[in-house]
Amino acid sequence: MIEKSLHILKNRFGYESFRPLQQEIISTVLEGKDSLALLPTGGGKSICYQIPGIQLDGICIVISPLVALIKDQVDQLKKKGVKASGITGGISYRDLDDILDNCVFGNYDFLYLSPERLKQDLVQERILKMNVNLIAVDEAHCISEWGHDFRPAYREINILRELHPQIPVIAVTATATKEVQQDIISVLALKNPQVFKSSYERANIHYHILNTADKRQALKKFYAQHSGSSISYVRSRKNAVEYSLLLQQQGITSAFYHGGLTNKLRSTTSDAWLHNKTQVIVATNAFGMGIDKPDVRTIVHLQLPDSIESFYQETGRAGRDGKLSTAQFIYNRNDIQHAYNQFVKSQPTAAFLKFIYRKLSNYLRIALGEGEGDSFPLSFSQFCKAYDLNGMQAYSALNALDRFSVIQLAQGFHRRCSIRFRESGTQIINFAQHRPEVNAIIQSILRTYGSSKNQTLQINPSLIATRSNTSEELVFETIDLLQSRELIDASIVHTDLQVTYLIPRDDDRTINSFSKELERQNRIRLEKLKSIIQLVTETDKCINRMILEYFNEENVSNCNHCSNCLKSRHETVTSSTLLRSIKEKPLNIQEIISVTGASQESVIVEIKRLLEQQLIILTDNNKYIVNE
């Protein structure tokens, strides 16, 4: 059977051979056995269930925590000619019904959905009718109360085992300590599972940590010495914009990425980076999940992530082609205090969560007992302004409501528009009779919503653009024009979130149901933050070794190429060693340090000497070569 798997790997996915452990995992799945696969970021986890899902008769059910990840994987499978469908937030009951029917009768290979969807009776009812060949749990660490992305809804996935008790289950994740592994096996009730675990070590990624008072200067210096595709991670939208502009001013092609961008802008920004038209993308952690770009040479962190797990996942987006790559951490003492404020102090208490939940429901005009399954656009800034809320605390509260399956948050920039007619439809049509595109838009609005002066109409700009064969921008321009001529009253609100209510509004009783778990999770978050702070501030121990020991790896030795190892060795480099190194291939300063194991000071001194003697030269891409 594995020969057929290899055929699918080559013809569908374009790879000539399996990565480590993939073949063994796929063989186990094809034999109908449960398995837990712990593979590092970039280790090819999804292929371990996608190939069996294609190869076996029936449909593979994939549980995934993120809407963006579901959409990305479904799109990628469709491009490969694989029939796949995904259930995301904000779809109507009718659309949900159609998707599930297609999966029952339409010969689909994959159905992706969030764990929250499994609570719906309609979903359970249709999955029972499906010819399921495999149950795959992606990002399985979300199951565990000890995991860094714990989602309570993940602990109810075993409903699938009740619906299809004989079907094998595969759980996959990149980051899981021993406690998390045991939790996954227990909660999913895996039957004598085969546990596949590769080492967390990434020998081709060299970790460097720099404590500096001037991060901006340090970032400029870093990119002056490092070419190649890169991601710089920050913790706020403001910093994403500011650091990207800083790099642009240095002549480095850079763009920023965060959840508040329009879907179109997010797509064009990521595509430019994926195709190497942009060297550096400065992003919040909204970027990177599901992206498999093999030639990322550097990852930079300019602020602390919330845990070692997050740091490991984000740095693991470099060097997927196996070539030498650098993970650079640039921080100062203010970042540590900021991280406490963002990840600990801003974490909501049960009382504050009740307060935010009530305010959100009132703001969206949802009555008690109502709202289940309904989606609402939300301008986060307007919401905070309406109730004079601290933005960081309010956003943490909304994320907590999402984590505990009360609501589902989706990021994305939209413009919500409402209008009220001041004049009759006939007068408005007469106004636009000599403007074909404006007339088409007005006609579409009137046909879709009518022309009553007695009510405020909520306009769907995308729908009107489609029906008038124009664009959303032109729809908004037309609405502005009509308002300027006092033909309508209009309100355009910029929204950057979509909120879907997963359960009916029930205020205090909803929060009380998980208040103790909320307190426990807040304590775990504090411990995880302490671990990443220790990793960053500890200067006398190998960085790579600290990461591996955090994930319970034993008998770990020093890597001899992280910044802590290099600092402790204080080795000097000779002219002959340096010349021999760059004769093999062009190297920049950091690569010379990594290859020779010498200190940065020693390398810089010797480079200056060899440059003065004209024995080496610096190329346009900041690499040194022998002057022959």
Image: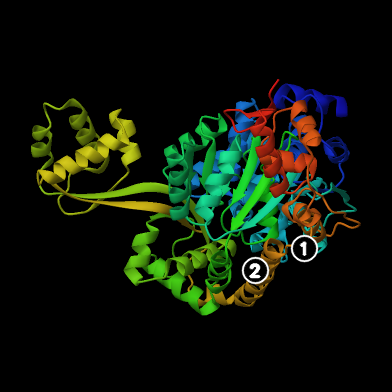
To which quarter of the image does residue 178 belong? bottom right
Q: Quadrant of residue 10?
A: top right
Q: Quadrant of the N terminus?
A: top right
Q: Which mark is residue 329?
A: none
- 92 vs 200, left or right, is left
N-term mark: 1 or 2: 2
Label 2, on which residue? Answer: 525
Q: Amino acid at mark 2?
A: Arg
Report the number of numbered marks.
2
Question: Can residue 284 be seen at all in this image of the molecule?
Answer: no
* 296 or 408: nearer the viewer: 296
Left of 600 or right of it: where is 401? left
The spot of residue 616 in percent (x, y) is 68, 29
Mark 1 element type: loop
Q: Nearer the viewer, residue 550 or 180?
A: 550
Image coords of residue 273 (percent x, y): 53, 34
Q: Is residue 9 above or below residue 247?
A: above
**Can you say which quadrant of the picture contains the C terminus?**
top right
**In front here: 542 or 137?**
542
Residue 61 at x, y percent in the picture? 69, 43
| Whole-number angstrom distance, CA of label 1 to CA of label 2 | 25 Å
Which of 154/334 is in front? 334
Say whether residue 340 is left or right of residue 34: left
Mark 1 vs mark 2: in front: 1
Q: Label 1, on which residue?
A: 540
Residue 248 position, x and y percent, is 44, 40
Within 10 Å of disc 1 (Cα), the crowding (few <14, some 14-19, many 20+) is: few
Which colouring convention does the figure follow?
rainbow
**Label 2: few (<14), some or many (≥20) within 10 Å?**
many
